Amino acid sequence: MTDEAARDRKDAQLDRDRVADGDDEALTTQQGVRVDHTDDSLKAGRRGPTLMEDFHVREKITHFDHERIPERVVHARGAGAYGVFRPYDDWLAEFTAASFLTDPAEETPVFVRFSTVAGSRGSADTPRDVRGFATKFYTSAGNYDLVGNNFPVFFIQDGAKFPDFVHAVKPEPRNEIPQAASAHDTLWDFVSLQPETLHAIMWLMSDRALPRSYRMMQGFGVHTFRLVDAAGHGTFVKFHWTPALGTHSLVWEEAQQVSGADPDFNRRDLWDAIEAGAFPEWELGVQLVPEEDEFAFDFDLLDATKLIPEEQVPVRPVGKLTLNRNPDNFFAETEQVAFHTANVVPGIDFTNDPLLQARNFSYLDTQLIRLGGPNFAHLPVNRPVAEVHNDQRDGYGQHRIHTSATSYNKNTISGDSPAPGAAGSYRHYTEKVEGAKIRERSESFKDFYSQAALFWHSMTPVEADHIVAAYRFELGKVTDKDIRARVVDQLRFVDLELAQRVAEGVGVPAPVEGAQMERRMSPALSQLSDPVRSVATRKVAVLAADGVDGTGMTRLVADLHRRGAVPEVIGLVDGTVRSESGEDVEVDRALPTMASVLYDAVAVPGGADAVAALRGDGRALHFVAEAFKHGKAIAAFGAGTELLEAARVDPAESGVVTAAADGGDVPDAFLDAFADAIAAHRAWDRRTDDIAA
Ligand code: HDD
């Protein structure tokens, strides 16, 4: 619990369950009996067999044997945090009875869990994958869960295909290879046979699948939901989360290296930012569509493989989400949190999107096996702050001691309490539905290509290049050439040039004829069309060795701190470096323990002896060259520029900032230019093809 964070209602509620093992506690059994010795079993003789009556060791081992629960069947790996949501004003009250979205005086506690999808719980944070963005709002009217992703579209249209899709993307059944990767035969076999996947696959091949940070990615509710006002009138809605720090990605080569250098990269980033008080923020926005416009689009609003272009229906801001508190215990909170798309509150309802309808079944069902029974809502992280009264009783893990004489409705014995129908009760939206019972896809779902093409044509050239490279990488890992050819054949319907470029990279015949798709654009789909620039929380490696220009380095580090960046001095070894003028400067990290891929930028201060030492160290040279290759901001002053030269970093390239000056003379313009380069995230136009790093 950070001092800055206000004690919201959820935080206060959790006090009941927090167990603080203080400084001076006696070790006990689960029964509270004090244990005198925990290193040896109770034995018949010093060298004899262990006795059954050793209740302490039996309990200790038995509990350990039962520590694991099944990991989530998808989204197994994640990281969570608490926070608050507050609407800016009440404009949305015209459309919804949900006061947590409309009353600026109401601050709603939340728990958010971010995740990857395909990898196991122990996999790495940075594979090419969708990211989950699930928010539990502990509203005064009950829990509302917005269980979204960082893509606005999904891979399939009907939940009936979800087990097929997940089986295809997960590691292959014979050998459980590959872990947390989509680049294998079964996924692409599935994709090649299922053109509805194409749009979401384009997103998966884009940089969206490689977020630099959970704090730097968008979130989407994906489905069209329904807002319902107090009079029962409905409006279609799509939910959007927009990160205050902008949407930024890693480059693919870097992402792969991060998986080894720090498999917890995104998890650690979220944790560290919150611990440092740099609370991540997102704006909640909505796209609203009046019910009478249900059929006004050239796609079906119920089709989760489609988005509503923002240029067509603008995203209107609703309020701000701030994450301000790390969990106390990963298992108790992040692992046991149970999201469910059907956790809705008055003012929010579903639509007939067949993917959403299936989800409304699946999430409750999965918690029963994952959390071991029907009482998972009693777990501290899942408990609403709204009062809970009902006649549901017993079951595994029942935590409540119901004192009522009755557990049925209606009753006279308990004064007919709890009774349904109180003010503020949830009422399902009244929708007229009729039709023949039918197992068929609606014709209105059958355009698989227009929006995939919209996405492709909305990319900047850099983003488009990355998509082509991603397709080449992924299909290049597919062993069956027929599958490669089928995927390329599908791409013809998006764009002939795209199909040809991919074909060329993966050794299958390039198609000569494409489909005539209308060339439309939606600039909002590009991450690079209007990026948010910010230095805040960016990690900067400052390379130093004995003989460093201490004055210049201190000035640079102080300037980065002042701008909200996170500089770290990296020495050849841990401890301190001695500056030119003889002062000892603390080293934050030792070079052998770190890698350039864990930083957003690199700076090399002057000092002839320091730079000579760095030049003589292959790791230092590699560090700089690799950062350069990944488009990162690079700065050097004084003799530091010689390290760039030795690493074949061209100072004339974009995002490389140098100054001749040393010490106190490091110019402001240099510091400003370095900050600008960091804020730009990456120098995408930099030429690095011949860099070997
Ligand atoms: Fe799902 C977990 C997001 C379709 C079935 N899903 C899960 C999580 C997220 C999503 C973020 C992790 C929640 C957490 O952190 O605990 N899922 C989505 C989105 C979808 C989607 C945005 C499409 C728009 N999911 C989807 C379908 C089904 C499921 C169609 C089944 C028919 N999802 C599940 C699940 C999981 C899950 C099996 C695994 C663990 C859990 O629910 O709690 O029920």
Image (spheres, rainbow, N blue to C red):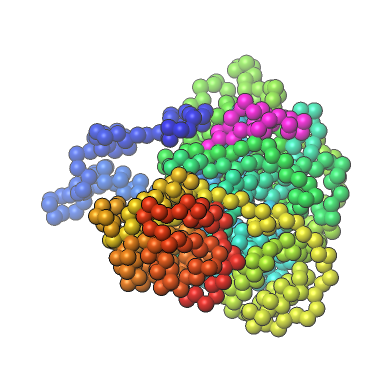
Q: In front: 57, or 248?
A: 248
| Residue that appears at 38% across and 58% down | 662
Q: Is residue 623 visible?
A: no
Rendered position, 182 above or below 669: below
| Residue that appears at 73% across and 33% down | 92
Measured from the top left, where is residue 91 in percent x and y?
A: 73, 31
Q: Quadrant of the N terminus?
A: top left
Q: Is residue 37 left or right of residue 417?
A: left
Q: Is residue 674 left or right of residue 146?
A: left
Locate residue 106: give its quadrant: top right
| Residue that appears at 62% across and 16% down | 415
Q: Which residues are magenta?
A: 82-109
Q: In front: 424, or 614?
A: 614
Q: Is residue 409 left or right of residue 382?
A: right
Q: Is residue 543 left or right of residue 693?
A: left
Measured from the top left, where is residue 232 in percent x and y?
A: 79, 31
| Residue that appears at 80% across and 50% down | 312
Q: In front: 105, or 628?
A: 628
Q: Is residue 487 magenta?
A: no
Rendered position, 500 above or below 416: below
Locate residue 604: give its quadrant: bottom left
Rendered position, 193 above or below 85: below
Q: Is residue 85 magenta?
A: yes
Measured from the top left, where is residue 618 in percent x and y?
A: 36, 72
Q: Is residue 20 visible?
A: yes
Rendered position, 668 above or below 517: above
